[in-house]
Amino acid sequence: MRASDIKRGTDTIFDVIQKNFNIEDTGYKSMIAELESLAAILKTNQDKNNTIRVREVEELLRNKGQAQLIEDKQMFNRIVDISKNINLEQGKLKQVIRMADDLIFDIKNTRDWLNKYQSIMKRGYYTSQDKLELLGKAILGRAIELCPIDTGLLRTSGSLLIGNGFIVIVFTAPYASYVHENMAVYHPVGQAKFLELALSEFIPNKTTWVETHGKNIVYARIDLAMNVKYKHYD
């Protein structure tokens, strides 16, 4: 077989790979970011099912190197290297075959990783609504941690209400707004602005917040687009 024939064969493989892998794709980084965010949210809810899900997500993150062929033109660069080394006169055929075998192995690993990723993200409990509910549980839990405690009524009045495409975190004790807004009072445990601080930790971009005033109620409404309607009294 002539070197020119092998070159044409490699060019054909190159065309196939270009059609199946977008070498300009930036999706790899967004997938990793989504997995990291999902793992962080799931960890705040320590039930058995979430523990299993966290393990699945963390396994993908540990093996994220398997998917790097879809980033930084790695596929393109490695095919070019193979093409440049095709020269039978210099006895490089074995080297070319070895490089091609390594690339095929990595392609298979990438496909396996992507299949696992798609499997996880397509499951019903990983819908946007479910992730929003998990976020709400995390924010409520953090707000309760920051909430001052005397009789315990204020903390126990905190709850999460779930709607279609939105959640509401609310503290309904009669004096909730007074304790929340009064920065001058010292609390041995907890502090004022407990809900606002919890919201800020999870949704720090306040350009998506709309603040309104309401007597004797402290609540935040969050939708799927991370728009926040935060009601308090001052």
Image: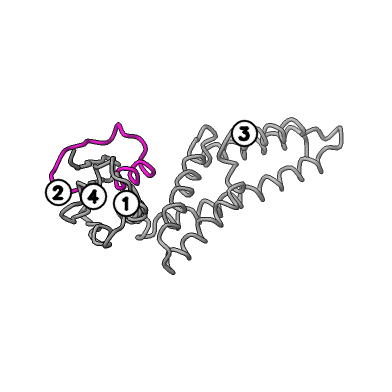
The residue singled out by tag 3 in the image is: 76
The residue singled out by tag 2 in the image is: 216
The residue singled out by tag 1 in the image is: 132
The residue singled out by tag 4 in the image is: 166
Q: Nearer the viewer, mark 3 or mark 2?
A: 2
Distance Cα–Cα, label 4 vs label 3? 43 Å
Q: Relative to residue 221, is residue 48 drawn left or right?
A: right
- Secondary structure of the residue carrying numbered label 1: helix
Amino acid carrying label 3: it is: Phe
Label 4 crowd bin: few (<14), some (14–19), many (20+), radius 10 Å: some
Earlier along the polypeptide chain: callout 2 or callout 1? 1
Earlier along the polypeptide chain: callout 4 or callout 3? 3
Earlier along the polypeptide chain: callout 4 or callout 2? 4
**Above or below — where is 216 with respect to 17?**
below
Pick the front one: 100 or 117: 117
The magenta span reads 193-218
Amino acid carrying label 4: it is: Phe
**Quarter holding residue 44:** bottom left
Label 3 crowd bin: few (<14), some (14–19), many (20+), radius 10 Å: some
The C terminus, quarter of image: top left
